[in-house]
Every structure is written in C-alpha cells, then in structure tokens.
Image: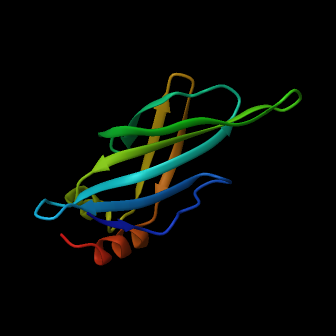
Amino acid sequence: MTWYNGADIFDQAYDTVFLRAWKNDGAPSRYQIYVADYYGGEWRFYESAYDSNGTRIDTTLIDRKVISCGSYTGCTYAEHMGLNVTRDYLERHAATGMTFQISGRAGKEIFYIPDFHIQGFLASTPK
C-alpha cells in the first residue's frame, strides 16, 4: 500500500485538515479529507459532513478522545474524521477550493480547503 498525505491546513487555532490518498497494488486510489477538530464544552459526536452545495459527504470516524479536564476550565475534546471523496470530486473543487461543515448531536464546525492546496495535492498523487 502506498500513502500520499498533503500538507496540514491549520484552519482554526488547533484544528487540522489535510488531504490524503492511498493505493493498494492493482486497485484504484482512495481519497479522503482528514479533519481533526479540537474544542471545549460538551462532546459534539460528529457524524455527518456537507459541502457548501449541500452535498452530503460520506464520513468515517477515526478517533474521539478527551484531551484534558480541569475543575475550572472544563474539558477539551478531539474528534478525528475522514471525509471519503473521489478524485473527481477534488478535481471539481480544484479551481475554487471547498468549504464543508461537519455536524454532530451537540455542535458543528466549518472548514475551508484553498484551491491551490487541492491543485498541489492532485498534482502529486497518481490517478
């Protein structure tokens, strides 16, 4: 298996977004938008994602954990999700970039991937 990871996009203070792909020998490449969201308050339990056109994006929960808790500060959480996309989907957003929202039972967050980031990633990964 061969992995391709794009550079981190720091969309917000501690959040991370990057594109990645992997390819098994003899199989087509698979593509994913990796999202790591760090926040305080209550668990959000992310379970869905939509792009700015209202298109639902298939998601995979990768990790969910408590980062820290304090008696005065409350708890900080991290949720890592994979948004499963196709190369064609990324190519359609390469000229404009893309905005998407992840949502859960107790919150949501909006992220943006710039056009040049998508273009660079596509140029460095095989079809």
| 35 left or right, relative to 120 | right
| 91 is higher (above) or lower (below) than 44 | below
In the depicted view, which residue is nearer to us: 93 or 78? 78
Q: Position of residue 67 (x, y in %)?
A: 69, 39
Horizontal and vertical percent position of residue 30? 24, 56
- In the shown orientation, is residue 123 left or right of residue 11? left
Q: Is residue 61 above or below residue 114?
A: above
Taking 119 as reference, is 77 left or right? right
In this view, the residue farthest toward the top is 105
Residue 112 placement (x, y as % from top left): 48, 55
Residue lying at the far left of the rendered structure? 26
The answer to whether residue 113 is above or below residue 70 is below
Q: Quadrant of the N terminus?
A: bottom left
Q: Residue at x 63, y 43 (%)?
A: 38
Residue drawn at 57 percent across, 23 percent down = 106
* View extreme (right): residue: 72
Compared with 63, 26 (above or below) is: below
